[in-house]
Image (cartoon, grey):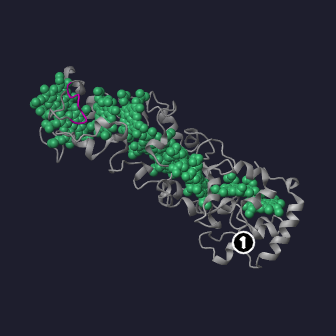
Amino acid sequence: MREFKVRSVHLPAIVCLLTAMLSTSSTAQEKPSQSLATAPPSETSKYLGSETCKTCHEEIYNGWEKTPHWKTTLNTKGGPSKQGCEGCHGPGADHVAGGGDKTKIFVFEGKSRQETSARCLTCHGEAHEQSHFAQSAHSSSDVGCLDCHSPHHAKEKEFLLVQEQPQLCYGCHTSAKADFAKPYHHRVNEGLVQCVDCHNPHGTETVRQLRSLPSGDFICYKCHVDKQGPFVYEHVPVKTEGCTRCHSPHGSTNPKLLNVMPVNMLCLQCHTFSTQLTAGGPIGPAHNQSAKYQACTMCHTQIHGSNFSNVFFK
Ligand code: HEC
Ligand code: HEC
Ligand code: HEC
Ligand code: HEC
Ligand code: HEC
Ligand code: HEC
Ligand code: HEC
Ligand code: HEC
Ligand code: HEC
Ligand code: HEC
């Protein structure tokens, strides 16, 4: 893992920098955990710029230069605390003056997930995709940015991920892995659909880190547009209880990802034959349960809603 080798440290550079540093840096000690955002203005002189880091950490620099974080060096508005290596590691003057003193710079290794994620969130906290991280199931279960991302040692070309999807997720979510291995499933393993199509691993405003449409509606409608309606005749539970009342979104042993088979057993969970209407329950079918009627959706084909038939025929 470690790319830095002491023998690659350029000695004349150290001497040169040391002289420069000793004349500019104050004696005040920089607490490693000090928040970048709250660094007082006098601390700005402690930022040296990424080119300086390069003199000793060339290998790391060369790799990093090819990642999207390189762009931060162009962020003149944010100032030095938001730029380059020091955007994440904090001001480097004391570290360099100390000849590479590890205690004088923010080192990620060994820090709590809360602390490392907080570092990343100084820049990403306001971004739409990450803005709910602090309240997410991941954050509250002590999963941090570095469980999924690595700024220097990413394994994936995109998004600095430590592993490809869905394997990254399966590593911790074994029951999801089992669900997607069922005979009927959204084709996540086949690469047609991704976990992140339905979930935002950085958290959302809703349960299960589920994404929703801008309207607030179920994410399912993004791809299954024909189910959205509005219909003249809505099948009430589709709108009130949602798709998962009847479908297992990851995978199922039943066709059409149904929770229950055969289909009449699903319908009869709510449409009881009781002559007494159960409190608030829907009406039972007038027809009996002879074989002819068991395949309910043979006749009630528009089960998600219809504009023409109040009993969801074609
Ligand atoms: C986006 C934040 C970020 C930026 C920018 C960044 N680093 Fe890092 N750095 C990390 C993290 C996180 C680690 C811990 C290892 C990991 O997850 O990749 C790390 C680890 C290191 C290490 C320890 C050795 C290693 O290979 O892990 C060195 C040295 C280092 N960074 C130097 C630099 C230098 C030099 C730059 C600029 C060229 C830089 N970093 C830019 C976040 C950053
Ligand atoms: C004068 C040479 C020199 C310069 C310039 C320099 N470093 Fe270092 N740095 C070192 C040395 C030497 C070590 C290794 C210390 C050790 O392993 O005990 C080190 C270690 C680190 C580590 C900890 C690596 C680990 O093992 O976890 C980080 C992070 C780091 N440097 C970041 C930076 C950043 C950011 C800059 C630019 C602001 C920078 N360095 C500039 C010499 C330098
Ligand atoms: C559980 C895994 C996981 C965790 C934890 C995680 N990410 Fe991600 N992140 C991902 C995945 C997967 C993607 C790719 C998303 C996609 O393909 O749309 C991603 C994409 C991103 C992106 C680029 C795309 C975008 O939507 O902006 C950024 C930036 C990002 N993550 C930052 C962070 C930060 C900062 C943290 C910590 C606060 C973090 N991530 C925590 C898995 C994670
Ligand atoms: C100094 C500000 C800053 C900090 C701190 C920072 N980032 Fe970023 N990050 C950026 C910028 C800027 C981009 C590029 C956005 C773009 O391309 O539009 C970026 C992009 C990313 C991406 C997307 C990469 C891609 O391929 O699109 C990921 C993932 C990411 N950062 C994760 C992290 C993680 C993890 C940390 C903490 C270790 C972190 N960032 C810390 C500013 C920062
Ligand atoms: C480092 C382990 C780890 C990784 C990697 C990981 N997760 Fe998680 N995830 C957890 C933990 C721990 C929880 C909280 C406990 C739970 O619900 O299982 C969680 C919760 C969730 C939840 C919310 C479950 C709920 O009940 O609210 C979703 C959705 C989720 N993860 C999706 C993903 C996706 C998608 C990925 C891949 C991009 C991923 N996770 C990667 C550990 C991980
Ligand atoms: C087609 C959309 C969709 C895809 C793709 C998807 N999920 Fe889910 N996931 C859901 C829905 C909806 C729920 C909520 C189920 C419920 O509340 O009954 C959920 C629930 C979860 C939960 C909570 C526990 C559970 O099993 O109910 C976890 C963890 C999770 N998903 C992880 C993942 C992972 C990991 C992937 C990718 C391998 C993934 N999901 C892909 C829609 C999806
Ligand atoms: C990113 C797009 C996408 C999202 C979001 C999505 N689906 Fe799908 N869904 C598909 C695709 C594509 C298929 C076709 C599967 C195939 O052919 O393998 C499918 C198939 C299905 C099927 C089975 C159809 C059949 O004929 O067997 C059901 C049921 C289903 N989805 C329900 C849902 C539910 C419920 C949600 C929300 C939790 C959802 N989908 C979210 C893309 C999506
Ligand atoms: C009241 C139970 C119920 C609810 C709620 C429900 N479905 Fe279905 N869905 C079914 C049944 C039953 C079938 C199988 C129909 C058949 O056999 O032809 C089905 C089939 C499907 C299919 C595959 C066949 C087709 O018509 O394209 C998709 C896709 C689908 N549902 C998506 C959804 C989505 C998305 C939601 C939420 C908006 C949802 N369903 C809510 C019962 C339901
Ligand atoms: C989660 C409970 C639930 C499930 C499961 C369910 N329904 Fe319904 N259904 C309802 C409710 C509630 C109504 C609205 C009743 C009302 O308006 O009085 C309704 C209405 C209907 C109606 C229209 C009745 C009328 O006269 O307005 C038909 C037809 C129907 N459902 C058929 C089915 C079939 C076929 C299935 C199985 C594929 C099914 N339902 C599954 C709850 C359910
Ligand atoms: C052979 C076609 C057929 C099958 C199969 C079928 N139905 Fe029906 N269903 C009908 C007809 C016809 C009506 C009466 C429509 C009307 O009144 O306009 C009806 C009406 C209903 C109603 C509305 C209440 C009523 O009796 O008027 C419900 C609820 C219903 N069916 C549920 C079911 C369920 C649940 C199943 C499966 C167990 C099922 N149906 C199977 C043809 C069928």
Q: Provide the residue designation for mark 1.
A: 46
Residue range in magenta is 299-305
Question: Please, is residue 135 above or below residue 278 in the view?
Answer: below
Judge by depth and name the residue closer to the eye, 214 or 10. 10
**Magenta-colored stretch includes residue 38:** no
Give me the residue at 17% from left, 35% from top.
307
Is residue 5 left or right of 122 when viewed as pictured?
right
**Magenta-colored stretch includes residue 303:** yes
- Decide if ligand 2 comes within 8 Å of the CB at mark 1: no
Judge by depth and name the residue closer to the eye, 10 or 143. 10
User: Picture coordinates of residue 196 (x, y %)?
Assistant: 48, 43
User: Picture coordinates of residue 167 (x, y %)?
Assistant: 58, 38
Give me the residue at 62% from left, 58% from top.
74
Question: Please, is residue 93 above or below residue 136 in the view?
Answer: below
Question: Please, is residue 104 above or below residue 298 in the view?
Answer: below
User: Picture coordinates of residue 60 (x, y %)?
Assistant: 75, 52
* Residue 260 seen by the camera: no
Judge by depth and name the residue closer to the eye, 40 or 210. 40
Q: Quadrant of the C terminus?
A: top left
- Quadrant in which residue 184 is drawn: top left
- Mark 1 is surrounded, within 10 Å at the Cα level, by few (under 14), some (14 to 19) or many (20 or more) other residues, namely many
- Secondary structure, mark 1, is helix
